[in-house]
Amino acid sequence: MRKEVRITVRTNPRLTVQKSVISILTITGLIGLGIIADSAAMQWAGFVLAFLTLFAVGAVRVARREGISITEARKILDELEAEEIAA
C-alpha cells in the first residue's frame, strides 16, 4: 500500500522574517502609543492586544504549515525511499 505524501518547498524563507519584523513593529507601536500618550491604561491595552496578536499569528502559522526547505525535503524523500526499498 502506497501512502500519498505532499511536499511543499519554501523558496523564499526571507518572507517569514519580514512577517515577523512586521509583527514586532506592530506590537511595539501598540505599546508605544500608550507611552507617548503617558497613559498606563493605554499601555496595558497595547500589551494585551500585543499578546493576543502574537497568539493569533502563531496559531495561523502553525495551521498553515507554509512549507519546508529543500534540505528538509531531501531528508523526507530519502526516508521515503529507504522505506520503499525495505518493503
Image: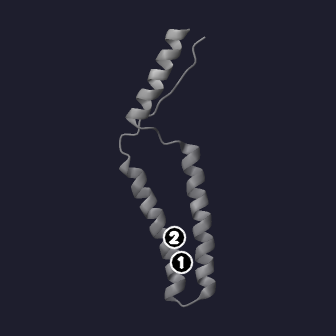
Real-space Cα separation, disc 1 to disc 2, in angstroms? 7 Å
Horizontal side, residue 3 vs residue 15: left or right: right
Q: Secondary structure at mark 1?
A: helix
User: Residue drawn 39% across and 51% down?
Assistant: 15
For the N terminus, the image quarter is top right
Q: Position of residue 44 (x, y in %)?
A: 62, 79
Seen from the viewer's position, the closer of residues 80 and 22 is 80
Residue 47's place in the image compared with 20, above or below, is below
Structural crowding at the residue carrying mark 1, measured as other residues with C-alpha within 10 Å and reported as few (<14), some (14–19) or many (≥20)? many
Q: Position of residue 2 (x, y in %)?
A: 57, 13
Q: Position of residue 58 (x, y in %)?
A: 57, 54
Residue 24's place in the image compared with 44, above or below, is above
Q: Contact (CB < 8 A) between labels 1 and 2?
A: yes
Residue picked out by circle 1: 31
User: Residue drawn 52% across and 89% down?
Assistant: 37
Q: In the image, what residue type sits under mark 1? A: Ile
Q: In the image, what residue type sits under mark 2? A: Ile
User: Residue drawn 44% across and 63% down?
Assistant: 22
Residue picked out by circle 2: 27
